[in-house]
Image (cartoon, rainbow, N blue to C red):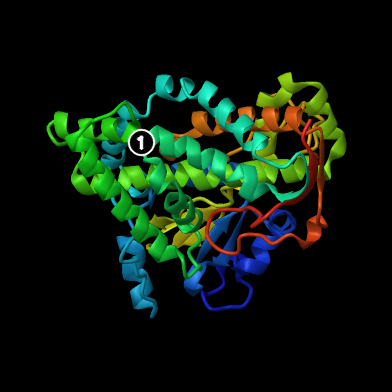
Amino acid sequence: MSAHEQCPHQDSRVDLGAAFKADAPARYARLRRLGPIHPARFHLGIEGWVVVGHDLAREALTHPALLKDSAPAAEALAAAGYVLNKPSVGLGAQMLEADPPEHGRLRRLAAAAFTARRTAELAPRIERIAHDLIDAMPPSGEIDLVDAFNAPLPAMVIAELLGIPEEHHADFRHWSRYALQVASPEHRPALAGLHALLAGLIADKRRVPRDDLLSALVGVRDERDGRLSEEELVGTGLMLIVAGHESTVNLLGNAVLALLRHPEQLQLLRERPDLTGGAVEELLRYDTSVERSTSRYAAEDLELGGVRIPRGGIVAVALGSAGHDAPQAEGDDPTVLDVTRPHARHLAFGHGIHHCLGAPLARLESTIALRTLLSRVPDLQLAQNADSLDWIGSGIIRGVVSLPVRYRVG
């Protein structure tokens, strides 16, 4: 019996808990050397498989029998003595957890409101927010960059995009922080808070529409034959909040940390700000903030990378690991951070029908934020040993809880 075929309760399963997440890049590298797929233990002890190799990751993300519908998994796990409980308050009815044809319908309707034009028009505002946040810092000293810059910037952008009034911003930022941290006691209260906030805002925007994304989604719901249900409307808004905030917060944190740990790359970006757009792709590849995909469930018995996955089996894709296994230009070393790397290949935004709808916004925010930070703050150093930083301990997000830095504003 191979390592990949061992029965569920054996200790050889990879435990993807807090200890793993703190050292994820090195642990995924060891797993890739052993094979592209491994039995794994997820949150609450639920067991399945994690795909760590790039080519198999692409296959898994588009496999017609690996679905988002958890019904087969719930049935199979119940037979094995598990109960796959859905939280009383989750992300709701939205495209991230839908299969075709529902997924296509929900994505088309969300895309009708979340347009390329609306994203592009945000560029001047994102730059103004970045400058304002730096202006608000003391001229020099020590600061938590997550709290002072990385977290408030995407929070303010997505709040303004959705049309969330300023009086709700503090609660919104707090709830967004914990919405994907499934092991945190704040997780369910955060989701409940966001649900209630969105439901109230949707009612307000139905009465008085404005030029924002939530009003546009309400318009899709009310003007297109009700093709977006009220539950789907709230779920889509919640998905945009979570995907548009927490992933970018930690993308910025991981990017700055990687640059601080590679000062020659940091200096190169300071000297060549024109490289920043391409550098964002390389930083997404090197240490992406969405460490794993959301779960997929086998609708039937199938084989993946030579491993038998029974009906109901849970499969997650290690998106960050795939970036270190992706084919690059001949001679390029994928273990090296290279901000001049042309066309860095990665799966940070997924692949296939669930490719992230907000990828253009994440790229735009990150490019502007990094370019502004590096130009305005010429002296930026870690104020704590990188190996002693605390990492988010649960969920699919990878990022540091805080990023203490010493700095001087130019």
| Residue at the outermost right position | 264
Residue at 45% x, 38% y is: 158
Q: Nearer the viewer, residue 256 or 292?
A: 256
Q: Is residue 322 visible?
A: no
Kindly indicate the quadrant of the structure image that contains residue 279: top right
Kindly indicate the quadrant of the structure image that contains residue 266: top right
Q: How many marks?
A: 1
Residue at 34% x, 60% y is: 192
- Residue 292's spot in the image, x, y percent? 55, 52
Q: In the rendered image, which quarter contains the C terminus?
A: top right
Look at label 1 and name its amino acid.
Answer: Gly
Q: In this rendering, would 190 be left or right of 370? A: left
Disc 1 crowd, CA 10 A, few/some/many (<14, 14-19, 20+):
some
- Residue 369's spot in the image, x, y percent? 63, 32
Q: Nearer the viewer, residue 335 or 183?
A: 183
Residue at 62% x, 52% y is: 52
Q: Nearer the viewer, residue 251 or 34?
A: 251
Q: In the rendered image, which quarter contains the N terminus?
A: bottom right
Residue at 34% x, 30% y is: 212
- Residue 364's spot in the image, x, y percent? 56, 27
Q: Which residue is mark 1?
A: 163
Q: Nearer the viewer, residue 368 or 46?
A: 368
- Residue 268's spot in the image, x, y percent? 83, 27
Q: In this rendering, would 216 be left or right of 332? A: left
